[in-house]
Amino acid sequence: MIWNRERECMPRTQLRELQLAGLKWTVDRAYERVPFYRAKMDAIGLRPQHIKTLADVKNLPFMTKQDFRENYPFQNFAVPKEKLVRIHASSGTTGKPTVVGYTAKDLEMWTELMARIVCQAGVTPEDTAQIAFSYGLFTGAFGLHYGLEKLGCAVVPIGGGNTEKQLMLMEDFGTTVLISTPSYALYLAERAEELGIDIQKRLRLRVGLFGSEPWTEEMRGQIQDRLHILATDNYGMSELIGPGVAGDCEAMAGMHIAEDHFLAETINSETGEVLPLGEEGELVFTSLDKEALPVIRYRTKDISVIDYTPCSCGRTHARMRKIFGRADDMLIIRGINVFPSQIESVLLSTAGVGPHYQINVWRRNYLDELEVLVEFTDDSMLDNYKKLDALTAHLKERLHNVLGINVKLRLVEPHTIERTTVGKAKRVFDHRNDPE
Ligand code: ADP
Ligand code: ZN
């Protein structure tokens, strides 16, 4: 089903007109009301009236997460504080968090957008949706919550963690939709299996909406097989609005970007140069109708490709391919670029090892060393060194083929790698700059 046909299936010429009007409105307001934007534009002699076409967006300066931090908490806002009705902030494990605000109109827009995202993932008003994201400053839970309610389904706001209770309510309430991080979905499957819950017989789950952290197609496959659901992807970030920027449709061939609210570009991460349509690069977004916090050319660090070809579902908005990784997650090991997603793809497509892994990078004797820990799945392996050795050698070879470097591989016993039950999974630990 299509939530808002007029918007989602808008002819692209009309969409571009809407985008241009939104871009001009955003730049005007940002220049008039936010000293940060005014200073950045003045520094290069750019005035709002110089933005005449959509292509002119490339003349505007970029902004990064750092710009949010430096203007902590409210200096980038384009409305007085009394106009705000909600404030969120991103995790910010170190230093000040990045703070974002919403007017009543912004919240309405976000809710509408989220209803669209859940609808295109196949959720209907008859569904019961369990939100296993943590409620709080994090945008994920609230975003999905209001969107699902708007669509008309029953929301179970259990929040993050509490896995056994999650499973109990899922069974007792007949939950059909799961909202969580992909890593938590896998953990739920694992706990259910351990507790002897027959997922197919006792649970009624049918669709999952997963996001907030990178996950590979292989991970999608495992979640689908183990939870017996359709595992859909959705993407967003608090700086822009929260979840709702893009999401899978029934065609499952890339996530439709809400182009009526956000202008998307892909750039070369190193040079900042705008890439031709269809080339892989860093995603950059500009908000088109946000009141409280206009965002101009925000560099996401997320690597993807945008596909402008028509989708079989009838929606006209472009689709972004699943995020390949973040520019700043890329590890440089002895000069070779390695994305954690490449490692995940290999591990999750190898029989005999589970989906839980950890990546460590060390510098020993001035040389970088990449160590991958992964659990073997079959307990009987413990007594069978030959089998363990063979599996280790097989994985090392596969990783070498994909990454082009030697990896130190350690198979560990099932359940020894820590699971993330609340928040985003952390799997990569770079120890190269640790104090001695
Ligand atoms: P939120 O609080 O909405 O998760 P954050 O600002 O904390 O927003 O994090 C946003 C980042 O999370 C994105 O820039 C991206 O790196 C990652 N992310 C969010 N959704 C996805 C997704 N579906 N796939 C891959 N990465 C994602
Ligand atoms: Zn589609």
Image (spheres, rainbow, N blue to C red):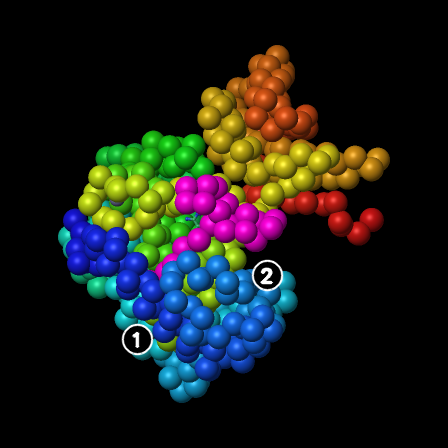
Majority secondary structure in the magenta region: loop
Look at label 1 and name its amino acid.
Lys
Horizontally, residue 383 falls left or right of residue 149, namely right
- Provide the residue span drawn in magenta: 260-282
**Mark 2 beta carbon near ligand 1 (under 8 Å):** no
- The earlier-in-sequence mark between 2 and 1 is 2
Determine the image quadrant of residue 117.
bottom left
Q: Does residue 140 appear anywhere in the picture? A: no
Circle 2: residue type: Thr
Label 1 sits on residue: 105
Residue shown at the point (75%, 49%) measured from the top left:
433
How many residues crowd mark 1 within 10 Å: few (<14), some (14–19), many (20+)? some
Residue 386, above or below 322:
above
The percent position of residue 308, horizontal first and vertical second, equals 33, 44
Label of residue 130 in the image: none
> Which mark is on residue 93?
2
Q: Secondary structure at mark 1?
A: helix
Instruction: Count residues near mark 2 (Cα–Cα under 10 Å), then give few for <14, some for 14-19, many for 20+.
Output: few
In this rendering, is residue 43 above or below 209?
A: below
Q: Within the displayed image, which quadrant is ligand 2 positioned in?
A: top left
> In the image, is 222 to the left or to the right of 417?
left
